[in-house]
Amino acid sequence: MIERNQTSRQPVVVGQVPMEIVSRSRRNRNRLLLLIILAVSAIFIWKNIWPNEQSELENTPAQPITDLHPIVLAKQEELIAATKKIGISILITDGFRSHEEQDALYAQGRTAEGNVVTQVKGGNSYHNYGLAIDFALRTKKDKVVWDMTYDGNGNGESDWMEVVSIAKGLGFTWGGDWENFPDYPHLQMDFGYTIRQLKSGLRPPAE
Ligand SMILES: [Zn+2]
């Protein structure tokens, strides 16, 4: 018992002397830490209030997109004209989509009412970069349909697939060719850019 008491008392008695040194160095360390925190927050505040020119330049390529890419827009017009020539009227139901709109669409059929229409959240669709369009067919009675068997021009071919074929000739890739979750109304031009690259701020040239 005595032995145990001695050992348990020992660290306390012996520890009292070095404790002062320990607490002094700890106080110094705390003061240094405080200084570092102050310096870091000063830099942070300074950077946020006065963003320097360089960071503005860096942000330029990642400017938010608000419309279709000019080439995609031109090809969309060509598609409308070319399909009209063979007696098919198409309606472009969607083009550029903001991240917020994409998120709302993603919620559809999941957390919101409706059918699931997309597999990707905001930022992950080519629509979010103005590089995709969706189409539908307009019947003679001015009804909008997504009927892939509809043959409005009566040439024995599916109007839908005729549109797809013309679109491919114009350089679009068709969502209907995707193995996982084919997207039949979807046409896109990625210009060789991956979603990852687009997300990082890279943009296909306008010409
Ligand atoms: Zn689409």
Image (tube, grey):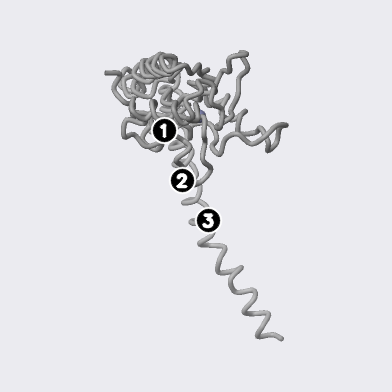
> Label 2 amino acid?
Asn
> Label 3 amino acid?
Glu
Label 3, ligand 1: CB separation under 8 Å: no
Which is closer to the viewer, label 1 or label 2?
1
In the picture of the structure, the residue carrying the numbered disc 3 is: 20
Element at badge 2?
Answer: helix
In the rendered image of this protein, does residue 203 appear above or below residue 87? below
At x 50% / y 46%, what residue is drawn? 180
The first of marks 1 and 3 along the sequence is 3
Element at badge 1?
Answer: helix
Quarter placement of the N terminus: bottom right
Residue 144, given in percent of the width and then of the height, sits at 60, 19
At x 64% / y 74%, what residue is drawn? 9
Which residue lies most toward the left here?
207
Direction from residue 196 to residue 181 in the image, left or right = right
At x 29% / y 22%, what residue is drawn? 205
Residue 109 sits in which quadrant? top right
> Label 1 amino acid?
Lys
Crowd tier of the residue under label 3, counting other residues whose Cα lies within 10 Å: few below 14, some 14–19, many 20 or above: few
Residue 103 sits in which quadrant? top right
The first of marks 1 and 2 along the sequence is 2
In the rendered image of this protein, does residue 196 appear above or below residue 163? below
Q: Nearer the viewer, residue 62 or 45?
A: 62
Which is closer to the viewer, label 1 or label 3?
1
In the picture of the structure, the residue carrying the numbered disc 1 is: 199
In the picture of the structure, the residue carrying the numbered disc 2 is: 28
